[in-house]
Image (cartoon, rainbow, N blue to C red):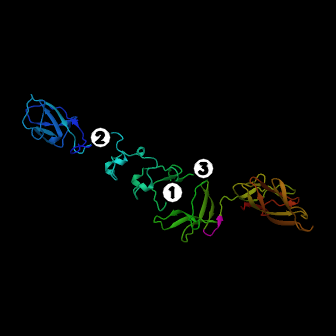
Amino acid sequence: MPFIGKQPQAGAYSKLDAITTSATATYNLTLDSGAYSPQSANHLLVSLNGVIQAPQDSFTVSGSQIIFDSALTSNDVIDFIIALGDTLDIGVPSAGSVNTSQLANDAVTAAKIAAGVVNTTELASNAVTTAKIADDAITGAKIENNPTIAGNLAVTGTSALTGNVGIGTAAGGNPLAVQADSGAGGIDILGRSSDNTATMVIGKSADGNTMYNTITSYSNRMRIQSGFSGDSNSIEFYTNDGLSMNIDSAGRVTAAGTPYFRVQKTNGSLTSAQIIIWNTVIQNVGSHYNSSNGRFTAPVNGVYQFNVLGSITSSPTDTSLHRVRINGTFQSDLFPIATNDASHISYCLAFALKLSANDYVDIESGSSTWYGTGNYHNGYTGYLVG
Protein backbone atom coordinates (compact mmCIF):
# COMPACT_ATOMS: atom_id res chain seq x y z
CA MET A 1 0.00 0.00 0.00
CA PRO A 2 1.23 3.60 -0.56
CA PHE A 3 2.90 5.55 2.24
CA ILE A 4 2.90 9.25 3.13
CA GLY A 5 6.51 10.26 3.37
CA LYS A 6 9.43 7.84 3.29
CA GLN A 7 8.47 4.21 3.00
CA PRO A 8 9.63 2.33 6.13
CA GLN A 9 12.55 -0.01 5.62
CA ALA A 10 12.42 -3.63 6.61
CA GLY A 11 14.86 -4.43 9.37
CA ALA A 12 15.90 -6.90 12.01
CA TYR A 13 14.02 -5.97 15.23
CA SER A 14 15.48 -7.42 18.41
CA LYS A 15 15.05 -7.07 22.18
CA LEU A 16 18.51 -6.76 23.66
CA ASP A 17 19.68 -8.60 26.75
CA ALA A 18 18.66 -7.21 30.19
CA ILE A 19 21.05 -4.81 31.90
CA THR A 20 21.60 -4.54 35.68
CA THR A 21 22.19 -0.94 36.71
CA SER A 22 24.91 0.38 39.01
CA ALA A 23 26.58 3.68 39.81
CA THR A 24 27.70 4.39 36.23
CA ALA A 25 26.29 5.91 33.06
CA THR A 26 27.92 3.45 30.55
CA TYR A 27 26.61 -0.09 29.94
CA ASN A 28 27.41 -2.81 27.39
CA LEU A 29 24.79 -3.75 24.79
CA THR A 30 24.46 -7.47 24.07
CA LEU A 31 22.16 -9.67 22.01
CA ASP A 32 22.11 -13.32 22.95
CA SER A 33 25.26 -12.65 25.04
CA GLY A 34 27.09 -11.24 22.03
CA ALA A 35 28.17 -7.61 21.68
CA TYR A 36 25.63 -5.59 19.71
CA SER A 37 26.47 -2.33 17.91
CA PRO A 38 23.46 -0.32 16.68
CA GLN A 39 23.73 2.03 13.74
CA SER A 40 23.02 5.02 16.05
CA ALA A 41 21.11 6.03 19.19
CA ASN A 42 18.11 6.65 16.95
CA HIS A 43 17.90 2.90 16.28
CA LEU A 44 17.20 2.08 19.96
CA LEU A 45 13.92 2.28 21.91
CA VAL A 46 14.96 2.56 25.62
CA SER A 47 12.64 2.47 28.66
CA LEU A 48 14.16 3.57 32.02
CA ASN A 49 12.05 3.40 35.18
CA GLY A 50 8.94 3.11 32.98
CA VAL A 51 9.79 6.22 30.92
CA ILE A 52 10.81 6.11 27.22
CA GLN A 53 14.13 7.91 26.84
CA ALA A 54 14.91 10.40 24.08
CA PRO A 55 17.83 9.30 21.91
CA GLN A 56 20.73 11.76 21.63
CA ASP A 57 19.26 13.71 24.62
CA SER A 58 18.87 11.09 27.34
CA PHE A 59 21.45 8.67 25.94
CA THR A 60 23.95 8.16 23.15
CA VAL A 61 25.73 5.07 21.79
CA SER A 62 29.39 4.36 21.14
CA GLY A 63 30.05 1.10 19.39
CA SER A 64 28.37 -1.61 21.48
CA GLN A 65 27.85 0.65 24.57
CA ILE A 66 24.96 2.86 25.65
CA ILE A 67 25.85 6.05 27.57
CA PHE A 68 23.16 7.80 29.65
CA ASP A 69 23.33 11.54 30.21
CA SER A 70 23.92 10.97 33.93
CA ALA A 71 25.05 8.10 36.09
CA LEU A 72 22.38 5.67 37.22
CA THR A 73 22.07 3.98 40.60
CA SER A 74 21.35 0.43 41.57
CA ASN A 75 17.76 1.50 42.26
CA ASP A 76 17.17 2.45 38.64
CA VAL A 77 15.63 -0.12 36.31
CA ILE A 78 16.23 -0.35 32.57
CA ASP A 79 12.91 -1.91 31.56
CA PHE A 80 13.95 -2.89 28.02
CA ILE A 81 16.01 -1.85 25.05
CA ILE A 82 14.57 -2.58 21.60
CA ALA A 83 16.84 -2.40 18.54
CA LEU A 84 14.68 -0.95 15.77
CA GLY A 85 16.61 -2.58 12.90
CA ASP A 86 19.79 -2.19 10.89
CA THR A 87 19.77 0.14 7.92
CA LEU A 88 19.20 -1.81 4.67
CA ASP A 89 19.00 -5.09 6.63
CA ILE A 90 15.98 -6.98 5.30
CA GLY A 91 16.33 -9.75 7.84
CA VAL A 92 16.28 -13.45 6.95
CA PRO A 93 14.22 -14.09 3.75
CA SER A 94 11.47 -16.64 4.02
CA ALA A 95 12.30 -20.09 2.70
CA GLY A 96 11.84 -20.25 -1.08
CA SER A 97 11.35 -16.48 -1.42
CA VAL A 98 14.62 -15.86 -3.28
CA ASN A 99 14.99 -17.40 -6.74
CA THR A 100 16.83 -16.53 -9.93
CA SER A 101 14.54 -13.61 -10.77
CA GLN A 102 15.57 -11.86 -7.49
CA LEU A 103 19.29 -12.18 -8.28
CA ALA A 104 21.00 -9.64 -10.49
CA ASN A 105 23.15 -10.88 -13.35
CA ASP A 106 26.64 -11.85 -12.16
CA ALA A 107 25.59 -11.14 -8.55
CA VAL A 108 26.81 -14.52 -7.29
CA THR A 109 30.58 -14.73 -7.72
CA ALA A 110 33.09 -17.29 -6.53
CA ALA A 111 33.87 -14.99 -3.58
CA LYS A 112 30.24 -15.32 -2.40
CA ILE A 113 30.37 -19.14 -2.34
CA ALA A 114 31.90 -20.77 0.71
CA ALA A 115 34.58 -23.36 0.10
CA GLY A 116 33.25 -26.91 -0.15
CA VAL A 117 29.54 -26.03 -0.22
CA VAL A 118 28.99 -27.03 -3.86
CA ASN A 119 29.34 -30.74 -4.56
CA THR A 120 27.75 -33.27 -6.88
CA THR A 121 24.42 -33.20 -5.03
CA GLU A 122 24.09 -29.45 -5.74
CA LEU A 123 24.69 -29.86 -9.48
CA ALA A 124 21.93 -30.91 -11.84
CA SER A 125 22.59 -33.80 -14.18
CA ASN A 126 24.59 -32.69 -17.22
CA ALA A 127 24.73 -29.13 -15.80
CA VAL A 128 28.48 -28.80 -16.28
CA THR A 129 29.37 -29.00 -19.98
CA THR A 130 32.56 -28.23 -21.80
CA ALA A 131 31.17 -24.76 -22.63
CA LYS A 132 31.03 -24.03 -18.89
CA ILE A 133 34.70 -24.86 -18.33
CA ALA A 134 37.24 -22.16 -19.06
CA ASP A 135 40.21 -22.96 -21.23
CA ASP A 136 43.03 -24.55 -19.23
CA ALA A 137 40.80 -24.54 -16.13
CA ILE A 138 41.31 -28.23 -15.42
CA THR A 139 44.93 -28.89 -14.53
CA GLY A 140 46.69 -31.86 -13.02
CA ALA A 141 46.14 -30.36 -9.57
CA LYS A 142 42.36 -30.51 -10.13
CA ILE A 143 42.38 -34.23 -10.97
CA GLU A 144 42.47 -36.67 -8.09
CA ASN A 145 45.09 -39.37 -7.87
CA ASN A 146 44.20 -42.63 -9.63
CA PRO A 147 40.97 -41.33 -11.24
CA THR A 148 38.62 -43.79 -12.91
CA ILE A 149 37.12 -42.69 -16.22
CA ALA A 150 34.00 -44.60 -17.28
CA GLY A 151 32.88 -44.84 -20.89
CA ASN A 152 34.89 -43.74 -23.89
CA LEU A 153 37.74 -41.23 -23.66
CA ALA A 154 39.17 -39.41 -26.67
CA VAL A 155 42.50 -37.63 -26.25
CA THR A 156 43.74 -35.40 -29.07
CA GLY A 157 47.02 -33.62 -29.45
CA THR A 158 50.11 -34.45 -27.43
CA SER A 159 49.53 -35.66 -23.87
CA ALA A 160 52.00 -36.78 -21.23
CA LEU A 161 50.94 -39.38 -18.66
CA THR A 162 53.16 -40.01 -15.66
CA GLY A 163 53.13 -43.05 -13.46
CA ASN A 164 51.49 -46.34 -14.41
CA VAL A 165 48.36 -46.26 -16.59
CA GLY A 166 45.64 -48.87 -16.89
CA ILE A 167 43.20 -49.00 -19.83
CA GLY A 168 40.34 -51.40 -19.29
CA THR A 169 42.02 -52.63 -16.11
CA ALA A 170 43.78 -51.33 -13.04
CA ALA A 171 47.30 -50.02 -13.50
CA GLY A 172 49.83 -52.72 -12.71
CA GLY A 173 53.55 -52.84 -12.15
CA ASN A 174 54.36 -51.81 -15.74
CA PRO A 175 53.87 -48.32 -17.18
CA LEU A 176 50.92 -49.41 -19.35
CA ALA A 177 48.34 -52.15 -18.83
CA VAL A 178 45.69 -52.66 -21.52
CA GLN A 179 42.84 -55.17 -21.35
CA ALA A 180 39.89 -55.48 -23.71
CA ASP A 181 36.55 -56.04 -21.98
CA SER A 182 34.34 -59.04 -22.61
CA GLY A 183 32.43 -57.29 -25.39
CA ALA A 184 35.48 -56.11 -27.34
CA GLY A 185 37.41 -58.09 -29.89
CA GLY A 186 40.77 -56.47 -29.33
CA ILE A 187 42.71 -53.24 -29.18
CA ASP A 188 42.51 -50.83 -32.12
CA ILE A 189 45.52 -48.82 -33.22
CA LEU A 190 44.18 -46.72 -36.07
CA GLY A 191 46.32 -45.39 -38.91
CA ARG A 192 46.44 -41.85 -40.16
CA SER A 193 43.47 -40.82 -42.27
CA SER A 194 45.53 -40.11 -45.40
CA ASP A 195 46.76 -43.67 -46.03
CA ASN A 196 45.78 -45.79 -42.98
CA THR A 197 49.43 -46.13 -41.98
CA ALA A 198 50.19 -46.62 -38.28
CA THR A 199 53.60 -47.02 -36.65
CA MET A 200 54.31 -48.31 -33.16
CA VAL A 201 57.73 -47.40 -31.81
CA ILE A 202 59.23 -49.85 -29.33
CA GLY A 203 62.32 -48.44 -27.69
CA LYS A 204 63.38 -44.84 -28.17
CA SER A 205 66.38 -42.82 -27.09
CA ALA A 206 66.00 -40.52 -24.10
CA ASP A 207 66.11 -37.44 -26.33
CA GLY A 208 63.36 -38.89 -28.51
CA ASN A 209 65.39 -38.55 -31.71
CA THR A 210 66.36 -42.20 -32.34
CA MET A 211 63.87 -45.03 -32.82
CA TYR A 212 65.25 -48.51 -32.24
CA ASN A 213 62.41 -50.87 -33.21
CA THR A 214 59.17 -50.19 -35.09
CA ILE A 215 56.06 -52.03 -36.20
CA THR A 216 54.34 -50.31 -39.12
CA SER A 217 50.95 -51.30 -40.52
CA TYR A 218 50.15 -50.33 -44.08
CA SER A 219 46.85 -50.82 -45.92
CA ASN A 220 48.04 -54.10 -47.47
CA ARG A 221 51.12 -55.19 -45.52
CA MET A 222 52.94 -54.97 -42.20
CA ARG A 223 56.59 -54.17 -41.57
CA ILE A 224 58.59 -55.11 -38.50
CA GLN A 225 61.89 -53.23 -38.36
CA SER A 226 64.72 -53.80 -35.94
CA GLY A 227 67.39 -51.15 -35.68
CA PHE A 228 67.44 -47.68 -37.19
CA SER A 229 69.77 -45.69 -39.44
CA GLY A 230 71.74 -48.72 -40.56
CA ASP A 231 71.97 -50.56 -37.24
CA SER A 232 72.58 -54.29 -37.82
CA ASN A 233 70.17 -55.54 -35.19
CA SER A 234 68.15 -58.73 -35.42
CA ILE A 235 64.61 -59.74 -34.59
CA GLU A 236 64.41 -62.47 -31.98
CA PHE A 237 61.47 -64.64 -30.98
CA TYR A 238 61.43 -66.23 -27.55
CA THR A 239 59.25 -68.99 -26.13
CA ASN A 240 59.48 -70.62 -22.72
CA ASP A 241 62.17 -68.09 -21.75
CA GLY A 242 64.43 -69.26 -24.57
CA LEU A 243 65.38 -68.01 -28.04
CA SER A 244 63.34 -69.98 -30.59
CA MET A 245 63.90 -68.05 -33.83
CA ASN A 246 66.18 -65.28 -35.02
CA ILE A 247 66.11 -63.12 -38.16
CA ASP A 248 69.40 -61.31 -38.68
CA SER A 249 69.97 -58.08 -40.61
CA ALA A 250 70.62 -60.05 -43.83
CA GLY A 251 67.27 -61.84 -43.59
CA ARG A 252 68.73 -65.20 -42.55
CA VAL A 253 66.31 -67.18 -40.38
CA THR A 254 67.54 -69.59 -37.75
CA ALA A 255 65.32 -71.57 -35.42
CA ALA A 256 67.09 -73.34 -32.61
CA GLY A 257 64.16 -75.65 -31.93
CA THR A 258 63.53 -76.85 -35.51
CA PRO A 259 63.07 -80.65 -35.37
CA TYR A 260 66.15 -82.31 -36.87
CA PHE A 261 67.87 -85.69 -36.57
CA ARG A 262 70.92 -87.45 -38.01
CA VAL A 263 71.45 -91.15 -37.31
CA GLN A 264 73.40 -94.22 -38.52
CA LYS A 265 73.20 -97.99 -38.17
CA THR A 266 76.46 -99.39 -36.82
CA ASN A 267 75.45 -102.56 -34.98
CA GLY A 268 75.23 -105.05 -37.86
CA SER A 269 74.09 -105.62 -41.45
CA LEU A 270 70.62 -106.79 -42.46
CA THR A 271 70.02 -109.81 -44.73
CA SER A 272 66.23 -109.72 -44.98
CA ALA A 273 63.49 -107.14 -45.35
CA GLN A 274 62.87 -105.45 -41.99
CA ILE A 275 62.54 -102.03 -40.34
CA ILE A 276 65.95 -100.39 -40.10
CA ILE A 277 66.81 -99.46 -36.53
CA TRP A 278 69.35 -96.65 -36.80
CA ASN A 279 71.03 -97.22 -33.46
CA THR A 280 73.67 -94.47 -33.43
CA VAL A 281 72.17 -91.04 -32.82
CA ILE A 282 74.46 -88.20 -33.85
CA GLN A 283 71.99 -85.34 -33.52
CA ASN A 284 68.36 -85.34 -32.39
CA VAL A 285 66.94 -81.82 -31.88
CA GLY A 286 63.66 -82.14 -30.02
CA SER A 287 64.17 -85.93 -29.45
CA HIS A 288 61.61 -86.81 -32.11
CA TYR A 289 63.63 -89.77 -33.45
CA ASN A 290 63.38 -93.00 -31.40
CA SER A 291 66.49 -95.19 -31.63
CA SER A 292 64.64 -98.17 -30.13
CA ASN A 293 62.18 -98.59 -33.03
CA GLY A 294 63.69 -96.49 -35.85
CA ARG A 295 60.74 -94.10 -35.99
CA PHE A 296 60.67 -90.34 -36.45
CA THR A 297 57.44 -88.84 -35.05
CA ALA A 298 56.27 -85.47 -36.40
CA PRO A 299 55.73 -82.99 -33.51
CA VAL A 300 53.58 -80.61 -35.60
CA ASN A 301 51.73 -80.45 -38.91
CA GLY A 302 54.06 -79.57 -41.78
CA VAL A 303 56.32 -80.63 -44.62
CA TYR A 304 59.39 -82.68 -43.64
CA GLN A 305 62.50 -83.43 -45.67
CA PHE A 306 64.19 -86.87 -45.37
CA ASN A 307 67.49 -88.15 -46.79
CA VAL A 308 68.61 -91.81 -46.82
CA LEU A 309 72.11 -93.16 -47.64
CA GLY A 310 72.67 -96.91 -47.96
CA SER A 311 74.77 -99.71 -49.47
CA ILE A 312 73.70 -103.22 -50.51
CA THR A 313 75.41 -106.31 -52.03
CA SER A 314 74.56 -109.93 -52.85
CA SER A 315 72.99 -109.74 -56.34
CA PRO A 316 70.89 -106.56 -55.88
CA THR A 317 69.28 -106.72 -59.34
CA ASP A 318 65.54 -105.96 -59.19
CA THR A 319 65.62 -106.07 -55.44
CA SER A 320 64.06 -103.24 -53.49
CA LEU A 321 66.68 -101.32 -51.56
CA HIS A 322 64.34 -99.77 -49.05
CA ARG A 323 60.71 -98.82 -48.60
CA VAL A 324 59.32 -95.66 -46.95
CA ARG A 325 56.42 -96.01 -44.49
CA ILE A 326 54.06 -93.52 -42.83
CA ASN A 327 52.26 -94.94 -39.81
CA GLY A 328 53.12 -98.45 -41.05
CA THR A 329 51.76 -97.88 -44.59
CA PHE A 330 54.22 -98.17 -47.48
CA GLN A 331 54.63 -95.01 -49.54
CA SER A 332 57.38 -95.79 -52.10
CA ASP A 333 60.15 -98.25 -53.01
CA LEU A 334 63.66 -97.75 -54.38
CA PHE A 335 64.97 -100.30 -56.89
CA PRO A 336 68.52 -100.55 -58.25
CA ILE A 337 69.51 -100.29 -61.88
CA ALA A 338 72.16 -102.95 -62.23
CA THR A 339 73.08 -106.17 -64.06
CA ASN A 340 73.60 -109.61 -62.58
CA ASP A 341 77.30 -108.88 -62.47
CA ALA A 342 76.76 -106.04 -59.96
CA SER A 343 77.85 -106.97 -56.46
CA HIS A 344 77.68 -103.63 -54.64
CA ILE A 345 75.37 -100.65 -54.94
CA SER A 346 75.40 -97.43 -52.89
CA TYR A 347 72.46 -95.12 -53.12
CA CYS A 348 71.12 -91.82 -51.74
CA LEU A 349 67.50 -90.78 -51.80
CA ALA A 350 65.92 -87.47 -50.80
CA PHE A 351 62.17 -87.06 -50.41
CA ALA A 352 59.65 -84.74 -48.74
CA LEU A 353 56.52 -85.83 -46.90
CA LYS A 354 53.58 -83.83 -45.66
CA LEU A 355 52.81 -85.08 -42.18
CA SER A 356 50.30 -84.39 -39.47
CA ALA A 357 51.30 -84.11 -35.85
CA ASN A 358 52.08 -87.55 -34.34
CA ASP A 359 52.52 -89.27 -37.76
CA TYR A 360 55.62 -91.46 -37.74
CA VAL A 361 58.02 -92.37 -40.55
CA ASP A 362 60.34 -95.39 -40.72
CA ILE A 363 62.42 -97.15 -43.39
CA GLU A 364 62.33 -100.85 -44.35
CA SER A 365 65.36 -102.56 -45.89
CA GLY A 366 65.26 -104.80 -48.94
CA SER A 367 65.97 -108.52 -49.11
CA SER A 368 69.59 -108.14 -50.16
CA THR A 369 72.41 -107.72 -47.69
CA TRP A 370 72.22 -104.15 -46.36
CA TYR A 371 75.40 -102.80 -44.81
CA GLY A 372 74.96 -101.67 -41.22
CA THR A 373 78.42 -101.94 -39.74
CA GLY A 374 79.59 -98.33 -39.81
CA ASN A 375 82.37 -97.00 -42.04
CA TYR A 376 79.85 -94.42 -43.28
CA HIS A 377 78.01 -96.99 -45.45
CA ASN A 378 74.63 -95.59 -44.34
CA GLY A 379 72.92 -92.56 -42.86
CA TYR A 380 69.46 -91.12 -42.27
CA THR A 381 68.52 -87.47 -41.70
CA GLY A 382 65.26 -85.52 -41.44
CA TYR A 383 64.02 -82.04 -40.50
CA LEU A 384 60.98 -79.83 -40.55
CA VAL A 385 60.80 -77.58 -43.61
CA GLY A 386 57.78 -75.64 -42.48
Of residue 103 and residue 312, the one placed in the foreground of this image is 103
Q: Residue shown at 52%/66% (left/top)?
A: 211
Of residue 240 and residue 198, the one placed in the foreground of this image is 198
Q: Quadrant of the C terminus?
A: bottom right
Identify the residue position indicated by label 3 in the image.
183
Percent across and percent down for residue 244 are 63, 58
* Label 2: few (<14), some (14–19) or many (≥20) C-alpha neighbours in 10 Å: few
Identify the residue position indicated by label 1 in the image.
154
Percent across and percent down for residue 188 are 58, 58
- Quadrant hosting residue 96: top left
Image: magenta residue range: 249-253
**Is label 2 in contact with label 1 (beta carbons under 8 Å)?**
no
Horizontal side of 261 relative to 64 (left or right) equals right
- SS assignment at label 2: loop
Identify the residue position indicated by label 2 in the image.
92
Of residue 322 and residue 345, the one placed in the foreground of this image is 322
* Circle 3: residue type: Gly
Q: Nearer the viewer, mark 2 or mark 1?
A: 2
Q: CA distance from mark 3 to mark 1?
A: 19 Å
Dot 2 or dot 3, earlier in sequence: 2
Percent across and percent down for residue 287 are 70, 54
Extreme residue toward the bottom, this view? 230
Q: Quadrant of the N terminus?
A: top left
Q: CA distance from mark 2 to mark 1?
A: 48 Å
**Height in image: 121 above or below 258?**
above
Horizontal side of 348 relative to 227 (left or right) equals right
Dot 3 or dot 1, earlier in sequence: 1
* Circle 2: residue type: Val
**Is label 2 in contact with label 3 (beta carbons under 8 Å)?**
no
